[in-house]
Image (tube, grey):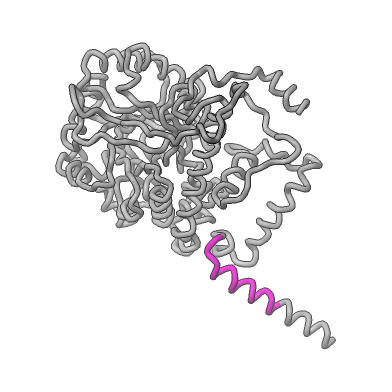
Amino acid sequence: MLVLDLFALLVVLGLVALYIHDVRQTKHTILRNYPVIGHIRYFAETWGEYMRQYQYLPDWVERPFNRLERSWVYRSAKGISNLISFGSENIPSFAFRNAAFPMLDEDKKSYPGKLIGIANGPGACRDPYVAKSFFNISGMSYGALSHAAVSALSRGARLAGVWMSTGEGGLSKFHLEGGGDIVMQIGTAKYGVRDALGNLSEERLREIADYPQVKMFEVKLAQGAKPGKGGILPGHKVTAEIAAIRGIPAGQDSISPNRHRDIGSIAELGAFVARVRHVTGKPVGVKFVLGDASFVDEWFADCATNPEHCPDYVQIDGGEGGTGAAPEPLADYVGLPITQALPLVAALRNEYGLRERIRIIASGKLITPDKVAWALCMGADFVSSARGFMFALGCIQAMKCGSGHCPTGVTAVDKHLIAGLDPMDKAVRVSHYARRVQDEVEIIAHSCGLTDASGFAPRHVTAIEPAMAGFRNQAG
């Protein structure tokens, strides 16, 4: 009996020691928020790779992101090797055309960056922006994300030399504290730049443009997960602080109009872009989801005729984009996927001679190097990701973004859950992920015989027929 009592005491002491260890460490948010029992997840994750050889849990069946994609991001963010053994489990829909004589290490060059905005001529701005990275952080609002998550992204953006979009929720102190480059997004409700009546405030625009970190402004027409509907932030996530930033009542659902009330035509869109650029002196872009390609055709034709109305960039968000809360029919069935939208927009831009005038940013589940490189081949100048960086923060795809009870603190409202996310530790992971994507995209470029990723063109990638993709997978 004494032996059993001693054993029980040792077990209790061991659990107490494990509990203390879990709540004091900062690397694993799940363990800080769920001490002791959180180890079950990591045990299952570790042993899963051995069980999956029996096909109980295939790596490629999860949605919206499968385990192969998420694991790549997790390892990259942690700085762990992404080398694989015995061939890939992936079933590709495209392949890059490698060169017979790839680029030698001594001939490789650093990515040169690209200029957004012009300094002279119609549509010029006072402060064009030289973007140094082709991979950046897409719009995620403070409110949809916790303050700890925004802080980590901001700090990580500076470490990696990438820009970060505020999302439509406005500019907060957490965006600024990291010191990285910022894109201020103007959503349909004009949060952060609205007056008391909800109209665009030029005074607020000037105040935000005065921050040296704010490099560009972005007019959001729509996003991939909810084209045709404005942003949705449940009332329980609208705290007094968030309400003050947005200029709305606290505790009430924050639902943006489905479009800007003062933008109802291509002419009005051009005038709005020109107005924001004139007031701020900085490049102005437009984020949209492609539905009817005739809109882009008419828009770019107007840009060629009226260059003062021309945006400095467009961000195309595929219909597969994500968000914290959206009606299912919109998320599933409205808006062209990025695989169809990007080539169409790039072709129209070139047709109207706007290749050097309008930069293209692509977004929509482009979280791994293969997809980023594909987008660059198809005509994108830059790629932005939201959910990729959420995974880098520790998101486990629990699908509770809108509830406020995210177990990793990324989209949580509960202070206890948010406290588990250490911004300093996760900032390093954000920077690791961004740099790994950059490095491996460059590896693909070098394999294609290019000195750097700025040389990608459509000829460097080819689609694979579904039947052939299956054959390649079986044949190894």
- Total marks placed: 0
> Hey, which residue is sitting farthest front in the picture?
106
Task: Give the quarter of the image for residue 296.
Answer: top left
Residue 88 quadrant? top right
Question: Is residue 100 shown in magenta?
Answer: no
Q: Main secondary structure of the magenta part?
A: helix
Can residue 196 be seen here? The reply is: no
On the image, the x and y values in percent for residue 10 come to 73, 80
Query: Residue at (37%, 15%) from the top-left corner?
Result: 350
Task: Tell me what residue is drawn at x 32 percent, y 29 percent.
Answer: 286
Quarter of the image for residue 444 reads top right
Say if 68 sits above or below 147 in the image.
above
Residue 177 appears anywhere in the view: yes
The residue range painted magenta reads 12-27
Q: Quadrant of the C terminus?
A: top right
Give me the residue at 48% from left, 64% from top: 416
The residue sitting at 52% across, 29% down in the picture is 373
Which quadrant of the figure contains the N terminus?
Answer: bottom right
From the top left corner, tell me how far across and down residue 250 is, in percent.
30, 53
Q: Is residue 395 above or below residue 15?
A: above
Q: Position of residue 453 (x, y in %)?
A: 47, 30
Instruction: Tell me residue 291's x, y (percent).
Output: 42, 20
Q: Is residue 178 left or right of residue 275?
A: right
In the rendered image, the vertical position of residue 168 relative to residue 43, given as above or below: above
Left or right, 230 with reference to 46? left
Residue 17 in magenta stretch: yes
Left or right: 173, with 378 as reference point: left
